[in-house]
Amino acid sequence: NAGVTQTPKFQVLKTGQSMTLQCAQDMNHEYMSWYRQDPGMGLRLIHYSVGAGITDQGEVPNGYNVSRSTTEDFPLRLLSAAPSQTSVYFCASSRDPRYEQYFGPGTRLTVT
Amino acid sequence: RKEVEQDPGPFNVPEGATVAFNCTYSNSASQSFFWYRQDCRKEPKLLMSVYSSGNEDGRFTAQLNRASQYISLLIRDSKLSDSATYLCVGLGGSGNTGKLIFGQGTTLQVKP
């Protein structure tokens, strides 16, 4: 099993551009989530999904959209990138939201 | 007050030492806790789950004290490879959202 995979590993965007961060898992996990990690802030939840077709907002959802059309994939879309979205983005998955989550390798995003 | 608080350290210890980290949490409804390890610029990796009073895995022991609302991680016989940041993580709210609440992390440096 590859576990949780994320692409791209690095990305540089200009302010106002849009892009999609990809996340996939091959563990048949129902629960998937997106976090961002900023220095001094710890990891914060952006959006999560408890199954295909179901998504909900986390702690810092503004500026991001998600969809969950399949169990395996959970893409994160930046609608109009802003410098405040410069961060490291981690996708995670779990068999159940009450149990441990497994993280992907992350995407390092810089918005200039 | 932060929901999950840790002493950021750094803890500098010699190889073979025993080191303990403490973590306090404010949400008494939290049912599950986790210790993750994060190496520089990498994703958090699950070290241990704590669902009841404690858990042990080799050189690592975690204990949960619900009355005092703290979790501890004990590392025995420290190795150079244990050098990393250790994240104390609680499951927020009712647990059905899967929202992980991360502490700031405690940095451990094991020296020869």
Image (spheres, coloured by chain):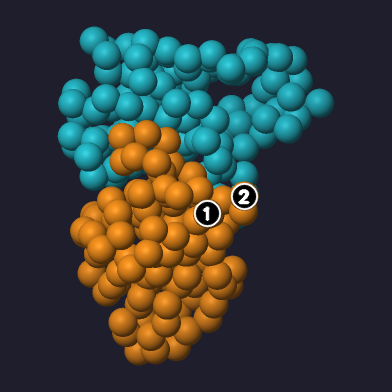
> Residue A4: x percent and y percent?
53, 54
Residue at which label 1 appears = A26
Tag 2: amino acid: Asn
In this picture, residue A92 sits left or right of residue A47: right
Residue at which label 2 appears = A1
Which of B38 and A112 lies nearest the eye of the viewer? B38
Tag 1: amino acid: Asp
> Residue B49: x percent and y percent?
45, 26
> Residue B64: x percent and y percent?
37, 15
Q: Which residue is found at the position 50% from the left and 48% from the top?
A: A27
- The tag earlier along the polypeptide, 2 or 1, is 2
**Residues marked 2 and 1 touching at CB (< 8 Å):** yes
Q: Which residue is found at the position 73% from the left and 32% from the top?
A: B81
Residue reaching furthest to the right = B112
Which chain's colour is cyan?
B
Which chain's colour is orange?
A
